[in-house]
Amino acid sequence: MSDSIADSIAQATAAVRHRWDGTPRAGIILGTGLGSFARNITAEAVIDYHDIPHFPRATALGHKGHLVCGRIGDLSVVTMEGRFHRYEGYPLSQITLPVRVMHALGVQLLIVSNASGGLNPAFGSGDILVLEDHINLMFGSPLRGPHAEALGPRFPDMSRPYDPELIEQALELARRHDFPAHRGVYVALTGPNYETRAEYRFLRAIGGDVVGMSTVPEVIVAVQCGLKVLALSVVTNLCRPDRLVPASGAEVVAAAAAAESRMSQIVLGILRRQPS
């Protein structure tokens, strides 16, 4: 990381602090699958991304482009209503800048959501995957380039990017609320096109359970920052190479919205267990 990235973090953090003086313990990235979750937050400040220096604009379907700062119960949180993707043309260092700003504000836990295509034949549309590992096929890392030691280790360990205790808690909450949830491996590609049948076969063969276009860059930075991470994915379209049905962005958003209440039950349950 260069000095320019450190300056970007400082300037973005100062802009948030100008509007909100809270000390968040949890950060939440509301991707497809948790688009309306912010209604659970008692908002103390809602900041448009274009009012935060160096934040990109969210252009993906269903991504609103607000930073919502406030509380869920007694827990102070900062929440991204909409994330950024590599297919939108942003560099990975800019896509992950909000995670560094969350860390600078005081966040210790990061919860990330997304929608994905189901590679594992045991998964059904609307099922929840709790990520226990990932495969990065974006062919890039947000940590590439000049490095500043103050932002974390140059070579962060990725043997357990997702917190094992949080994984177990999330699965237990799904069982308690009686809906399907699995643990598994998320494969990240750049998109925005969906994959071919041959690609689906390849991704399943290398160990992928679902495939998507986000999350991994943010998780890499969160691990470098020393944050605990929980990532949840709602399985939308089913990637069955031998009986593949064409997918559309609108259908993925609709399928994710139908599963949103289940995702929210897990996230709220996890947050209620965090010390305020």
Image (cartoon, rainbow, N blue to C red):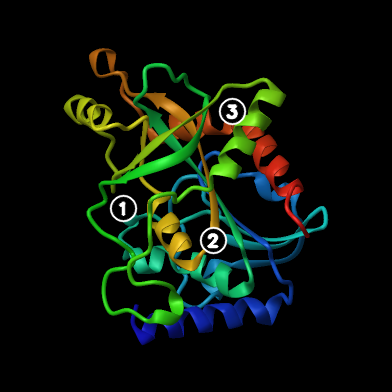
Q: Earlier in the sequence, mark 3 or mark 1?
A: 1
Helix, strand or loop under label 2: loop
Residue that appears at 38% across and 38% down: 186
Which of pointers 3 and 2 indicates the residue nearer the eye?
A: 2
Of residues 74 and 46, the one nearer the viewer is 74
Q: Is residue 274 left or right of residue 229?
A: right
Q: Is residue 144 left or right of residue 219?
A: left
How many C-alpha atoms fall within 10 Å of the one at disc 1: few (<14), some, or many (≥20)? some
Residue that appears at 60% across and 31% down: 171
Looking at the rendered image, the quarter that the N terminus falls into is: bottom left
Query: Relative to 94, is 191 above or below?
Result: above
Residue that protrudes farthest toward the left in the picture: 198
Residue type at numbered disc 1: Tyr
* Residue that label 3 marks: 258
Identify the disc placed on residue 76: none
Helix, strand or loop under label 1: helix
Residue type at numbered disc 3: Ala
Residue 12 screen position, x and y as percent: 53, 78
* Residue that label 1 marks: 87
